[in-house]
Amino acid sequence: MPKFLIQAAYTPEGTQGLLAEGASGRRAAVDQVVTGLGGTVEAMYYAFGEDDLVCIVDFPDPVSMAAVSLRVKASGALRTRATPLLTVGELDEAARREVSFRAPGA
């Protein structure tokens, strides 16, 4: 299953919701949306600094990740970034593939 790193920052409205609902309430909501699309939450951590929340999630396909991203962003409660994650084996496979590329000016 494709794995994604999610980094999120709460908006002021989202922070108010977090304060009212608590971190465990938000964890339950994340679990529900991810499992509802056939995925799993591998890890979920709260942080402070540029990001308020960091998750690693597995989804059956990138379209599922995109669907969640669209709904979360549309809520206005969070600003998010999703980064696809590759295993060591997947990167080894990518490195072995022949790619025809010419650098600009070469």
Image: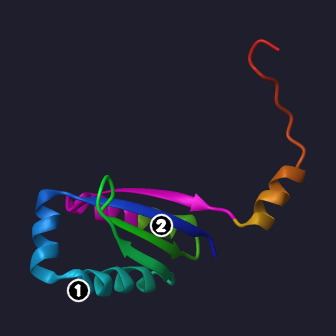
Q: Secondary structure at mark 2?
A: helix
Residue occupying the point 44% across, 64% down: 6
Residue occupying the point 24% across, 81% down: 23
Q: Nearer the viewer, residue 100 or 89?
A: 89
Give the labeled residue for mark 1.
25
Where are the magenta residues, as a range? 68-86
Residue 49 image position (x, y, % from top left): 30, 55
Q: Quadrant of residue 31?
A: bottom left
Residue 43 as seen in the image, left or right of residue 17: right
Q: Are marks 2 and 1 in contact (CB under 8 Å)?
A: no
Mark 2 vs mark 1: which is more N-terminal?
A: 1
On whether residue 81 falls in the magenta region, the answer is yes
Tally of numbered discs: 2
For the residues labelled 2 and 1, the Cα–Cα distance comes to 21 Å
Give the labeled residue for mark 2.
65
The quadrant in which the C terminus is found is: top right
Residue 17 image position (x, y, % from top left): 13, 72
- Outermost top residue: 105
- Outermost front residue: 48
Image height of 42 relative to 72, above or below: below
Q: Marks 2 and 1: which is nearer the front?
A: 1
Q: Amino acid at mark 1?
A: Gly
The quadrant in which the N terminus is found is: bottom right
Mark 1 crowd level (few <14, some 14–19, many ≥20, 10 Å Cα): few
Residue 16 - label? none
